[in-house]
Image (cartoon, helix red, strand yellow):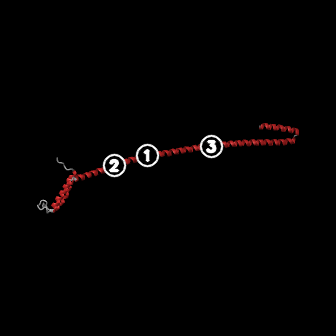
Amino acid sequence: MMRLPNRTSVAVTAVAVVLAGPALAASKNPFSAEFWKLSNTDFIVSIAFILFIGVLFYFKVPGMISKMLDDRAAGIQSEIDEARSLREEAQTLLASYERKHREVQEQADKIVAQAKVDAEAAADQARADLTKSIERRLAAATDQIASAEAGAVKEVRDMAATVAVQAARDVIAKQMTAESANGLIDAAIAEVDAKLH
């Protein structure tokens, strides 16, 4: 069974023929008898070139080159696939980090908003507590003023009663006898004592 040449060997052969073409064109006419003599260097070079190509095919150099190129292409393709998968993984990771960043930012915004609400509530509570404290102090001050006023009124009354009693004693002492004065003084003291207590 005859094996058909693969694309690589056909390509190498085509390249060899194309490269040999200029050598034949620069030489003598290949259809003349002079060309086919061993003294013709162009003929010797052409034979050496054909033998060289034959040795390359015999040792399957085109197949090795093709295999090396295929291996290199497969290596490059695997590197491209790996780079693509790494890129996709990096994009997934980036999207995950961006999502986490957004979540953290939302939580931070919520915390700041809650802190503002708490601060406003604390300020309102402090205002209410201050208002109550001021009201209590005003009530205490009012009570103290009322108590002081009541004490002052009592003291003034006591003093007025004492002065009135003294004045009445002096007036009565000048106008009355000792016996009637003593009776009036006793009656006035008893009346003042009854009114004050």
Q: CA distance from mark 3 to mark 1?
A: 48 Å
Q: Which residue corresponds to the image point at 37% horizontal and 47% vertical from the top-left?
A: 89
163 left or right, relative to 110: right
Q: Residues within 10 Å of mark 2 (few under 14, many from 20)?
A: few
Looking at the rendered structure, the kind of residue marked 3 is Ser
Q: Residues within 10 Å of mark 1 (few under 14, many from 20)?
A: few
161 left or right, relative to 70: right
Picture quarter with the C terminus: top right
Most foreground residue, 12 or 107: 12
Most foreground residue, 108 or 162: 108
Q: Which residue is mark 1?
A: 100
Of the two numbered discs 2 and 3 on the same chain, state the one appearing first in sequence: 2
Q: Find out whether the residues at labels 1 and 2 contact each other: C-beta distance under 8 Å.
A: no
Q: Residue 112 at what x, y percent from top left?
A: 50, 46
Q: CA distance from mark 1 to mark 2?
A: 26 Å
Looking at the rendered structure, the kind of residue marked 1 is Lys
Q: Find out whether the residues at labels 3 and 1 contact each other: C-beta distance under 8 Å.
A: no
Q: Which residue is mark 2?
A: 82
Q: Nearer the viewer, mark 3 or mark 1?
A: 1
Of the two numbered discs 3 and 1 on the same chain, state the one appearing first in sequence: 1
Q: Which residue is mark 3?
A: 133
Label 1, secondary structure: give it: helix
Q: Which residue corresponds to the image point at 35% horizontal and 47% vertical from the top-left?
A: 85
Total marks shown come to: 3
Q: Residues within 10 Å of mark 3 (few under 14, many from 20)?
A: few
